[in-house]
Amino acid sequence: MSLKEYERQLEELFIDCEKNCEQNGKVASYIPALERVDPDLFAVSIMDTQGRSISTGDVDFKFTMQSISKVVIFLYALENFGEEAVFERITLDPTGDPFNTIMGIQSTTEGNVHNPMINSGAIVLSSMIAEKDGPEALQNMLEFTRTLTGDDGIYVDVEVFDSEKSTALRNKAIAYFLQASGSIHDTEDSLDLYFQMCSIAVTVEDIARMGALLANKGVDPFSGERILQDSNVKTANAYMLLSGMYDASSRFTIKVGFPAKSGVSGSILAVVSDRMGIGILSPPLDSRGNSVKGIQLLKKLSEHWDLSVF
């Protein structure tokens, strides 16, 4: 099928979802800066492994990555510190817990239980990066994110960062619990880096390009340059498939069938291995913190184009 035909079909599915998809979600209200976002925003961008892209909707709107940044944090740690060091700090066993769970964050006799796709695990890895990179941690993470998205203009949205930091009592509770159990060393540095990563502003096209990189086994679709190790991409994609949609991950895997990571800005990063990356924005969320309309559009795309890995 030609790119033009894909574009036509995407537009049809997008319009159908605008008209007929459920609209019962609510924007995230526990972060004041996110609560003010227009709930009617809707955008999708798709880039294939050859670098060809199609997009529709509010594609120029900048939103913050929120929990999509967990994938970036995880990949950065794997690339820079190695798998052995990373898995001394987080678990190899993904879980389907809610994103802000406090359950199970303590150490066990068999090792840690911190999943990198939920808040506790991402805070542990943020601590690791802050410890090892010191004052350069944020700049290094920004440069890494720019490389993954191909967008040199990526920045931290300070308004969202301040809003998130001032209201994130549950994340602070998680971090203090982690520090008390010896999983992190400095609560403030760990949380600052974690909140800054959540507050990085992107577009759906940035997310789609990152997805295309992951779909292409870590090789840049444009230059052919290897950006990420293939083994690290496989690990990140596996975690997204099993835990990327939190406690809705099993249902998403069955109904949609490929790796994805959601963010409470209403964003979703999706990866269809060897084929394409997908970026979606629709701010209203379901009770599990996932974009209501975004999931429905991904289900339509999966069914229409037979994208499920199964």
Image: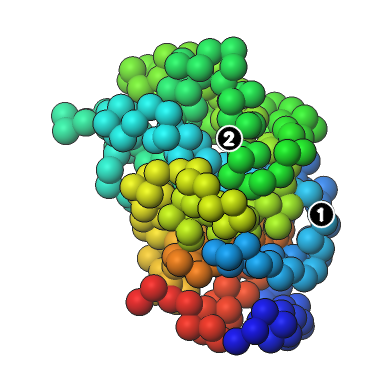
Crowdedness near tag 1: few (<14), some (14–19) or many (≥20) residues, C-alpha within 10 Å: some
Q: Quadrant of residue 240?
A: bottom left
Nearer to us of marks 2 and 1 is 2
Q: What residue is shown with label 2?
A: 144
Q: Quadrant of the N terminus?
A: bottom right
Q: Residue 10 appears at what percent x and percent y?
A: 69, 80
Q: Label 1 is placed on what type of residue?
A: Phe
Q: Is residue 59 visible?
A: yes
Q: Is residue 288 above or below residue 53?
A: above
Where disc 1 sits, the SS reads: loop
The location of residue 266, given as percent across then percent down, is: 66, 56
**x, y (%) of residue 57?**
80, 69
Q: Position of residue 42 (x, y in %)?
A: 76, 66
Q: Along the line of sight, which residue is nearer the eye, 105 or 207?
A: 207
Q: Quadrant of the C terminus?
A: bottom left
Residue 61: which disc?
1
Relative to residue 136, is residue 282 depicted above or below? below
Left or right: 298 with respect to 152? left
Secondary structure of the residue carrying numbered label 2: helix
Does 152 sit left or right of 222 as displayed?
A: right
